[in-house]
């Protein structure tokens, strides 16, 4: 593929008064990448039987299902991310989220891309040297789209590692990352088809002080000419069941135990390319709306 074979690099955030963000973005997968394909797990017998507050990859805990009006909220403009970050002073142990894979309007010629993912450690700061991600990607090339599921563990992986899970436009996707010892259990599930894939990956230096739910314009053409890809016209990506576990209790993005950061994807001249809406009443869902390539 035209955009394959690119190494992840820091994207270079747009400076704001609140923070600098984020340090890395997923690159597109290349054959012969450093990670190995995980073994495909058998399809779940009843994907929708999982309670909304818990994904199969996260352990059962006490659940706080109420958003707090007193939660500290920050705003950041970035060069390639749009969505929400939960920022805590203690380590998260699991993150989960759901979204519907959008139908893209691909340009007739040229390329464009969009990545949708959840992860840990993405924010600039003390945990910036690591990043654990799982999600889906759609790439457009001359009017044709290709969608796939992937994971990536930085700094170890040079490229995204592609799952075997089939993903198509309109499919409902659920994903989670759970700490297991000094490794991470990454699970992605197609709730529409019942298919599921997972992998256990070490990342001993991960600090998990941030948890992310993100729509991204990936960084491509690295390492020789790193640049943010054209953001594919995805319309709207709706997230739900966006929760994390901290100190043995599950809470939504809007939980008062941490602050949240809203990310707008903007060009360096201030052109808005993608923007998340407000959190839903339960604090666990939001929608990212596409504005411009």
Image: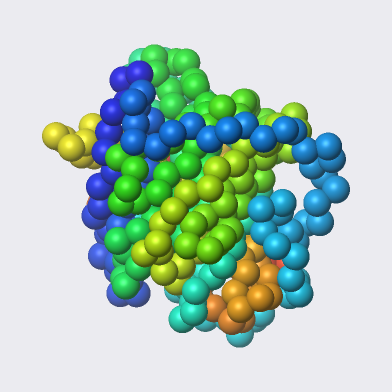
| Residue 282 left/right relative to 110 | right
Could you tell me which residue is drawn at 53 percent across and 63 percent down? 181
Looking at the picture, does residue 50 appear above or below residue 261?
A: above
Looking at the picture, does residue 281 appear above or below residue 215?
A: below
| Residue 281 left/right relative to 274 | right
- Tell me the quarter of the picture where residue 131 sits: bottom left
Residue 249 showing in the rendered view: yes
In the image, residue 268 lies at what x, y percent?
25, 52
Depth check: 66 or 152 in front?
152
Looking at the picture, does residue 91 appear above or below residue 216?
A: below
| Residue 115 left/right relative to 69 | left
In the image, residue 114 lies at what x, y percent?
45, 36
Looking at the picture, does residue 52 appear above or below residue 216?
A: below
Q: Residue furthest left?
A: 224
Could you tell me which residue is drawn at 66 percent across and 45 percent down? 174
In the image, residue 191 lies at what x, y percent?
74, 38
Could you tell me which residue is drawn at 40 percent across and 37 percent down? 35
Depth check: 236 or 186 in front?
186
């Amino acid at each position: 593929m035209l955009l394959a074979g690119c190494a992840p690099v820091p994207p270079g955030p747009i400076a704001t008064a609140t923070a600098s963000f984020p340090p890395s973005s997923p690159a597109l997968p290349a054959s012969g990448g450093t990670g190995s394909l995980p073994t495909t797990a058998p399809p779940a017998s009843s994907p929708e039987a999982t309670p909304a507050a818990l994904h199969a990859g996260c352990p059962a805990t006490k659940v706080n299902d109420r958003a707090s009006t007193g939660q500290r909220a920050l705003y950041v403009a970035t060069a390639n991310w749009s969505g929400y970050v939960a920022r805590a002073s203690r380590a998260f142990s699991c993150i989960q989220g759901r979204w519907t894979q959008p139908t893209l309007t691909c340009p007739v010629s040229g390329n464009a891309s969009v990545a949708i993912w959840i992860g840990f450690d993405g924010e600039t700061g003390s945990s910036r040297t690591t990043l654990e991600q799982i999600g889906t990607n759609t790439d457009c090339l001359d009017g044709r789209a290709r969608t796939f599921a992937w994971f990536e563990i930085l700094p170890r992986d040079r490229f995204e590692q592609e799952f075997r899970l089939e993903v198509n436009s309109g499919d409902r996707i659920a994903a989670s990352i759970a700490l297991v010892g000094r490794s991470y259990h990454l699970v992605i599930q197609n709730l529409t088809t019942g298919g599921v894939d997972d992998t256990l990956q070490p990342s001993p230096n991960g600090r998990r002080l941030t948890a992310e739910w993100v729509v991204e314009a990936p960084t491509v053409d690295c390492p020789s000419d790193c640049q943010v890809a054209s953001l594919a016209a995805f319309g709207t990506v709706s997230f739900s069941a966006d929760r994390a576990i901290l100190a043995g209790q599950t809470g939504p993005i809007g939980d008062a135990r941490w602050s949240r950061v809203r990310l707008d994807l903007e060009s360096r001249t201030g052109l808005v390319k993608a923007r998340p809406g407000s959190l839903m009443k339960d604090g666990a869902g939001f929608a990212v709306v596409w504005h411009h390539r």
